Amino acid sequence: AQTLDAFGADVIGLNCSVGPQIILDAIEKMAPVTRRKLSAQPNAGMPRDVSGRSMYMASAEYMATYAHHLVQAGAKIVGGCCGTTPEHIAAMVEGVRPLSPRQARLPMKDRRHSHPDVPPENPGVEPVPLAERSKWGRKIATAEFVTSVEIVPPRGVDAAKMIRDTAALRDAGVDAVNVPDGPRAQSRMGALLCSILIEQQVGIETVIHYCCRDRNLLGMLSDLLGASAVGLRNLLLITGDPPKMGPYPNATAVFDIDAIGLTNLVSNLNHGLDPGGNAIGQPTKFTVGVGVNPAAIDPAQELKRFEWKVEAGAEYAITQPVFDVQQLEKFLSTIDHVRIPIVAGIWPLVSLRNAEFLANEVPGVVVPAKIIERMRVASAKSKEHGVAEGIAIAREMLERVRPHVQGVQVSAPFGKVELALEVFRDTLSRANLRAPTAAQPA
């Protein structure tokens, strides 16, 4: 309430989620610390399942009694949300009618002094320094150039190829393996479980893509606490592709929160707090990464969302595949005021068909016409020429973005890690060079 008051809100309110008793408790704590008008619109109690129907059991008389108490506590607007009927509202009107305006406000106390019933906002504990959370975090924190390869989890239960491929990446000197979370709404082995297998059996760090699409808030919290407990440390927080992109037309999305809210959630966990501000004991030690699209159709909206992600606690960002370096440079020039380490996405094309698919059917990816034309000419010669040209383009992108970013993530097209390593040829030996900092021009 104090924060919203400071922002200049005309009305500060509570609505839905719980019944009138809990709303009353909150209004009694809010009223003494703000002069703004207060609104209270509780549910008619909590729903119960009755023969498959959600029924709200609070009577009209019960709601009327609490409407009276809410006005006495300082609420200027009183109503109802889920489960309230015209009968409830009519009874609430009669319940508050006897109250005069003088009876309907508690005195505001000086906000410089704490109210005994209002606990101070819990700032949590100081997060573990980024450099101490993981090897990936140490390189990000010390401005070293990081390298990673994105591999897609297996479609079935056999993880043998994934283990072999990630071992090859480890042996080549790649810093981390990026593991997507249900990309393009396809059914694959879970990213968290894949990451556990990779880290435990191969010994290379993972960067887990964790999306908001498939889990509600409680499920996300459970996943993240479990991930921390088994030693997973590096996250890339994304909203997630809509289910309609995949082959399962009846699949639904949850989206309790988006990537910004998820970033806030993980940042709180790193401070030892759950989403409600309650202490969880030992804090998590996640490195907090987010996605960003330098080629977004609406650059202003993308910039605004990026600013919010940084404000929420993002510590680095990984871009969509870069095929236009000038576009990347232009975007980087707009984020100097909220600059965090940027890792550029690199995608080796393998054919004209692959290039056209990315350009037209993968959200957030922009492939310029000149790149498609290069792939057209090469693919017309042979399949091998197409693959070679795609690798050449990826290597060009890597070398051109290198002065402007703190690392690269190279995708392994169709699970072919040898193509990703070919893009990295002559690069891994130089990967420990210091990357540009926010103070350096992009």
Image (spheres, grey):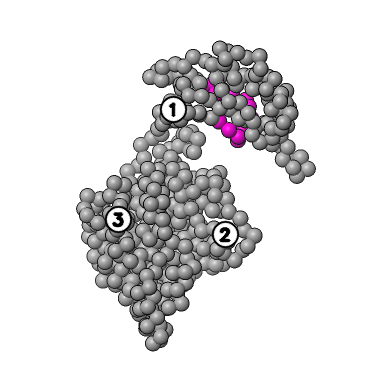
To which residue does mark 1 refer? Answer: 5
Residue 120 vertical position relative to residue 150 in the rendered view, above or below: above
**Residue type indicated by callout 1:** Asp
Which element type, helix, strand or loop, lies under badge 2? helix
Magenta range: 14-29
Name above or below for residue 294 compared with residue 356: above
Q: Dot 1 lies on which element?
A: helix
Would you name the residue on which mark 2 appears?
243
- Is residue 7 part of the magenta span, yes or no? no
Mark 3 or mark 1, earlier in chain: 1
Give how far across and how far down residue 339 sits, in percent.
30, 49
Nearer-N-terminus badge (3/2): 2
Q: Do the residues labelled 3 and 2 touch (CB within 8 Å)?
A: no
Q: At x 62% / y 19%, what residue is drawn?
A: 69
Residue at 55% across, 63% down: 245
Name the residue rendered at 21%, 53% in the picture: 440
Q: Position of residue 408 (x, y in %)?
A: 33, 62
Q: Is the magenta stretch mostly helix, strand or loop?
A: helix
